[in-house]
Image (tube, helix red, strand yellow):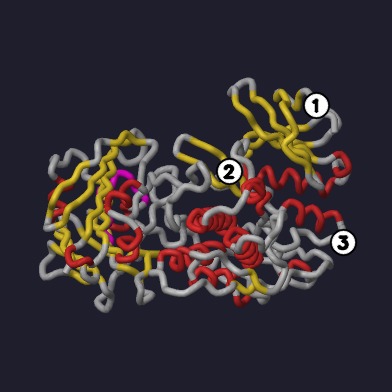
Amino acid sequence: MTSPERIGPYRIERLLGTGSFATVWLGHDPVLDSRVAIKVLAENWHHDLRVRERFLDEARLLRRLDDERLVRVHAAGELADGRPYSVMAWADGGSLRDRLAAGPIPPPAALDLLAEIAAGVAVLHRHGVVHRDLTPGNVLFRSGPDGERVLIADLGLAKALAAASGLTARAGTPGYMAPEQDDPLSVVDTRADVYGLGRLGLRLLGAAGEHGAGDRPHRGGTTRLREGVSPRVAAVLRRATAPRPADRHPDAAAFRAALRRAATAPARPGPAPPARAAPGPSPGRSASGPPPGRSASGPPRRGPGTAAPPRASSGGPARVRDRPTGRRRFGVVGLGVAALVALGATAGDAATAGRDAGTWTSGPVTVALPPGWRAAGTGWAGQYGDDGRLEPALVMSPDPRRWAVDPTVPGAFVGLSAAIAARTTPAGFVAERPHAACAAAPVRRTRQGGVDWVVARFTCEKGRPEIVEAAGLAPGHAGLIYVQVTPPSGSRADFVDTLLAGVRVR
């Protein structure tokens, strides 16, 4: 294939890849002095108006969603021969297919990566979009100032094009596509992507020698997971790859939440059992179905800022862990607040008012409320204990329900987690929560209320002017206490220490 010298205003450097419907080139943007990926519709399709429209639909969709977990589209244009092209952010870290070809990824990093992939797919599901072709080649990596970002690419374009053009070849990638994608009478919805996520999990966590040189998991039978992968994780993957859609997790957010619970559960002795992969679909016709009306878990309530909220999110992005994969670090830098606990406590809930209006209790956690503040919360959404129940947490603020979405409202999140204490230290947990867009003060230690706290303070130019992260071990090994505070404007220097001194764990 002859490389063009230019596409529109962009100078072409080299070919990045080719597919059935498009070719992708690495170009240079002279205005911004940066590299971009330019996707051009293949010559043999540009006369088909339906295919052309599908190509442009993908660019419009990515532009409309404009999410940090998806490949971003900057512009679109048309070549002299009439073929459309889209200009996208260049994923300079390559693809998951490239990394799997280089060797296995350690299980802890593989679990983190799978959770990040699921978070990206969850973005699509919240917008009523089904990817339908989740493969290692469609998971990309892009470096940035706050670490490496996992990106979801190619939003089901091949399947949509095949359906639009009347092709009989099935759309999707064997080994990853759900069985119902082979049935022309089936409706393909978010559960097809859950199947794809499960198959990616089997590929990432399968034992050495299970996959050979390819990038596909076994098409049927049993895939034995590597040593160190817990039986609970194996159970999550078995459910995700169930042959019947009704037996799977309803969407990517539910899959990710189940994976997170399984990955953070206390380890049990004994080897991990095999994960029974559903039989791969046999060749046949592709099926195209309408996307679901909405995700079963609903849209997440997002905190302020540009990055995903921390672990208190109920259905939004929440990393399983934050560990390096290879030589790079991928993940989300928290700039939002953790005020996404389940609110609306009632008399029968675990969270109840204290003995006076100045305190609030959630399970074993009691806090002293600053003057004029109220509290709400029944548990730490998405954070489960050994008994399967939410671990205790609460939000306190002059307006607890507005704190998560209004950067002008001060407040604090307080949570207690035995599961987090089992995997990391207070200093390690605070280190997992950098705010890259803010200036960090030196981490300090203080003893308040009988707890030795690790405290990190960040001052920010956008969003909330100040965010404080604090963690300590509760007396009696009850767990790790996590407190995130956005102090009131003009508050005293000892406001945070006074608030920490008012946190009690019985």
The residues bearing labels 2 and 3 have C-alpha atoms spaced at a distance of 33 Å
Measured as percent of width and height from the top left, residue 375 is found at 23, 61
Quarter-wise, where is residue 88 in the image? top right
Above/below status of 8 relative to 238? above
Span shown in magenta: 405-415
* Circle 1 or circle 3, nearest the eye: 1
Query: Label 1 belongs to which residue?
Result: 4
Quarter of the image for the N terminus: give it: top right
Q: In the displayed image of the protein, which residue is found farthest to the bottom? A: 348
The amino acid on which the numbered mark 3 sits, given as a three-letter code, is Thr
Measured as percent of width and height from the top left, residue 377 is found at 29, 65
Q: Earlier in the sequence, mark 2 or mark 1?
A: 1
The amino acid on which the numbered mark 2 sits, given as a three-letter code, is Phe
Residue at (40, 58) in percent of width and height: 313
Query: Label 2 belongs to which residue?
Result: 141
Crowd rating for badge 2 (residues with CA inside 10 Å; few <14, some 14–19, many 20+): many
Nearest the viewer among 176 and 394 is 176
Number of residue marks: 3
Residue 263 sits inside the magenta stretch:
no
Q: Is residue 329 left or right of residue 279?
A: left
Quarter-wise, where is residue 335 in the image? top left
The amino acid on which the numbered mark 1 sits, given as a three-letter code, is Pro
- Look at the numbered discs 2 and 3 and tell me whether their residues touch, using CB distance below 8 Å: no
Query: Label 3 belongs to which residue?
Result: 168
Is residue 280 visible from the viewing direction of this image?
yes
Q: Earlier in the sequence, mark 1 or mark 3?
A: 1
* Circle 2 or circle 1, nearest the eye: 2
